[in-house]
Image: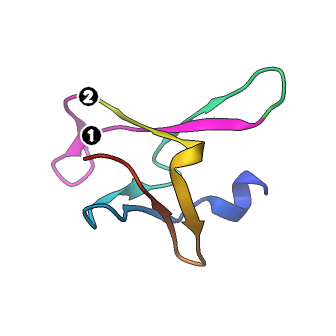
Amino acid sequence: MRYNDISSKEIVNITNGKRLGVLGQTDLEIDEHTGQIQSFILPNYKWFGLKKEGEEAKIHWNSIKKIGEDMIMIEAKP
């Protein structure tokens, strides 16, 4: 799977139904030896996405349960 295949998809936690962000507004942690994505790093935005505040959330690749047409569903503790 390529980054273009998953970019612009909404990331939703199925544990609590919370929307976490949109892939494309995130940073990626990539294994430098294999080139595989290890995790997404989601900034905590306030003020309509204009101001970063607080800690970033890290979503590990193995937390992903389903990649659909419009969203990526993860299972993570809130």
| Residue 10 is covered by the magenta coloring | no
Q: Position of residue 32 (x, y in %)?
A: 77, 21
The magenta segment is 36-54
Q: Residues within 10 Å of mark 2 (few under 14, many from 20)?
A: few
Identify the residue at image location x=72%, y=25%: 31
Tell me: residue 49, above or below residue 19: above
Q: Which mark is residue 55?
A: 2
Q: Is residue 46 magenta?
A: yes
Dot 1 alpha-carbon crowd within 10 angstroms: few under 14, some 14 to 19, many 20 or more:
some
Relative to 75, 71 lies left or right:
right
Label 2's element?
loop
- Asked whether 49 or 40 is in front, the reply is 40
When asked about the image quadrant of residue 38, the answer is top right
Does dot 1 land on a helix, a strand or a loop? loop
Image position of 75 (left or right of 51): right
Q: Is residue 18 above or below residue 69?
A: above
Residue 8 x/y as whole percent: 54, 63
- Whether tag 2 and tag 1 are in contact, CB under 8 A, the answer is yes
From this view, report whether residue 2 is shown above or below residue 10.
above
How far separated are the C-alphas under marks 2 and 1? 6 Å
Looking at the rendered structure, the kind of residue marked 2 is Glu
36 left or right of 74?
right
Type of amino acid under label 1: Asn
Q: For the point 57% across and 67% down, which residue is it?
A: 66
Decide which of tag 2 and tag 1 comes sooner along the chain. Answer: 1
Residue identifier under label 1: 44
What is the image's colouring?
rainbow
Q: Position of residue 13 (x, y in %)?
A: 36, 59
